[in-house]
């Protein structure tokens, strides 16, 4: 990273940023080109293992890509603030971001509900939000096991 003064390497800080984000952008390999998807997600951490959970329809282009090559990269960001200094003719943007990579696995039926609960908890952390269990069999649930990640922060001036 060019700007070491903005780099975040502390695992707890990285997880704190992830928990503030609303969208995770997942990048898959599409015949040598990145295929980028904005997705809702959930997070689980257990010791040194961090897993990101996603859900979708049972089939489609992204599922075919995952089945062909389960390597993926991800990016998420938050705390956006545009700053314009008119007297200097200068704009900048403050933010926090996390990016990384890992491998995706499609979850078996007996692991889907717990993973969907993680997704619900990410957006409804103040309650045990209800979701209809009838949707589970017609929902594909998959996880990205994080192998590497780094973060960056640019504070407001």
Image (cartoon, grey):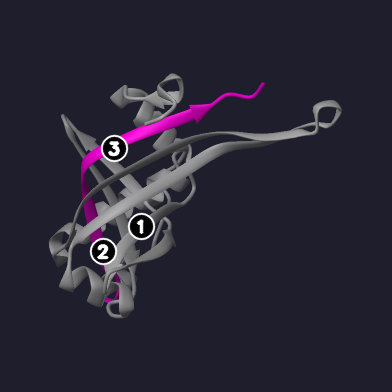
User: Relative to 86, is 76 on the left or the right?
Assistant: left
Residue 19 lies, in percent from the top left, at 42, 37
Give the magenta part as a residue range. 138-157
In front here: 91 or 43? 91
What secondary structure characterizes most of the magenta part? strand
Q: How many marks?
A: 3
Quadrant containing the N terminus is top left
- Which residue is denoted by mark 1 in the rendering? 26
Circle on res. 149: 3
- Magenta highlight on residue 125: no
- Residue visible at 43% across and 50% down in the picture: 129
When the figure is inspected, residue 135 is found, relative to residue 128, above or below; the finding is below
CA–CA distance between discs 1 and 2?
14 Å
Q: Quadrant of residue 150?
A: top left
Question: Mark 1 or mark 2, which is nearer to you?
Answer: 1
Secondary structure category for the residue under label 2 = strand
Tag 3 and tag 1, C-beta contact below 8 Å: no
Indicate left or right for 14 with 110 as reference.
Answer: right
The residue drawn where x is 40% and y is 63% is: 36
CA–CA distance between discs 3 and 1?
13 Å
| Residue 83 visible in the snapshot | no
């Amino acid at each position: 990273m060019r700007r070491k003064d903005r780099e975040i390497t502390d695992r707890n800080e990285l997880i704190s940023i992830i928990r503030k984000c609303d969208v995770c952008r997942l990048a898959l390999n599409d015949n040598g080109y990145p295929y980028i998807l904005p997705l809702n997600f959930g997070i689980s951490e257990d010791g040194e293992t961090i897993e990101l959970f996603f859900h979708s329809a049972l089939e489609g282009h992204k599922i075919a890509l995952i089945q062909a090559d389960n390597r993926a990269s991800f990016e998420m960001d938050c705390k956006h603030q545009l700053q314009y200094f008119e007297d200097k003719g200068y704009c900048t943007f403050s933010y926090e971001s996390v990016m990384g990579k890992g491998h995706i696995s499609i979850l078996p039926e007996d692991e889907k509900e717990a993973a969907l609960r993680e997704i619900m908890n990410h957006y409804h952390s103040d309650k045990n939000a209800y979701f209809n269990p009838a949707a589970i069999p017609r929902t594909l649930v998959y996880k990205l096991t994080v192998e590497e990640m780094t973060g960056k922060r640019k504070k407001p001036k």
